[in-house]
Image (cartoon, rainbow, N blue to C red):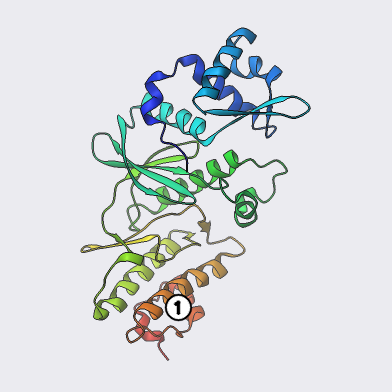
Amino acid sequence: MVRNVAGEMAELDPEDFYLLSGVEQGMRFSEWVRRDKLPDYADLTAEEIAYRIDRCLDRELIERKTLQYEGYQLTFEGYDALALRTFSERGTIDGVGSPLGLGKEGDVYEVQSFKPLALKYHREGYTNFRAVNREREYTADRDHVSWMYTARKAAEREYEAMEALYPDVSVPRPVDHNRHAIVMDKFGGVELARAKLEPEQAAGVLDLIYRELVTAHDLGWVHADVSEHNVAVAEDGVTVFDWPQAVPIDHENAREFLERDVANLLRYFGRKYPHEIDRDADTAAIAAAIADGSFETVRAFEE
């Protein structure tokens, strides 16, 4: 688990951030950044570099490895610190509060601002880097891909999709993003996987989710990873979140991903509400109706 560094930001000097930024720049070219390159990358003297390395190592913001040379790499804590500093300088957030959710591919915290917001750090590649790279189309064609690049591109893709979809699709309102982090509106409701729906509500809620996918498709996007874990259910409707794997509808696999989204939801509802939802409904036909905008209700596709 990645440590929350928000409480340590006041201890860091501007020169510490110069070093972190220098390591970040060097990681664009190699996994481990040579120590002798850091004065140029960080715009600090060799003596200052030595002092800042010790401070950042003590705080676990960077890590060191001896190869044929002495190399350094940001940790996720160091990357978090860089993003937090940028958000603070922009006036996006005033402070970081309690965790809202800590997961395999992202950590979410409540943040203080002019209203309650949520801060999401992308962690793609942190635990299963190779598998993530195989799955994400934005890393497929690069020779050197670091976890840092993967996480940043995931955040960029999610923010791009949310900006395109909000407010027509019920997604969290995007506020700001930097590096691998996104600030968005905090949203209510209960994760679908934990929601206790009455059986007679099941078809209606599934219809609501599919209709959000209709609007998303009409605006040019397929979620590509919808499940019971990234839909929130509230009294006033549903919210579809976690969009880092979203693809434009002209992507070569967009229809396949849409059918998978449809099947994931149908499988979940069919398993949990077997007397209300026909899990053998034609997923390809439902996906086609979502794509052409004719979808009205899942009941129309029951055998």
Q: Residue at x 45, y 84 (%)?
A: 281
**Up-down: is 136 above or below 24?**
below
Number of numbered discs: 1
**Up-down: is 133 above or below 41?**
below
Q: Nearer the viewer, residue 60 or 178?
A: 60
Q: Residue at x 32, y 70 (%)?
A: 208
Res 126 → quadrant? top right
Mark 1, Cα crowd under 10 Å, few <14 / some 14-19 / many 20+, is: many
Q: Quadrant of the C terminus?
A: bottom left
Q: From the viewer's perspective, is 115 left or right of 10?
A: left
Where residue 4 sits in the image (x, y, percent)? 41, 35
Res 72 → quadrant? top right
Q: Residue at x 45, y 64 (%)?
A: 226
> Residue extending furthest front?
58
Q: From the viewer's perspective, is 83 left or right of 49?
A: left
**Up-down: is 48 above or below 41?**
above
Q: Secondary structure at mark 1?
A: helix
Where residue 96 sits in the image (x, y, percent)? 32, 34
Where residue 287 sits in the image (x, y, percent)? 48, 74
Q: Nearer the viewer, residue 119 or 137?
A: 119
> Residue extending furthest right?
68
Q: Nearer the viewer, residue 170 or 276?
A: 276
Amino acid type of disc 1?
Answer: Ile
> Residue extending furthest bottom?
303
Where residue 232 sits in the image (x, y, percent)? 32, 60
> Which residue in the protein does label 1 denote?
286
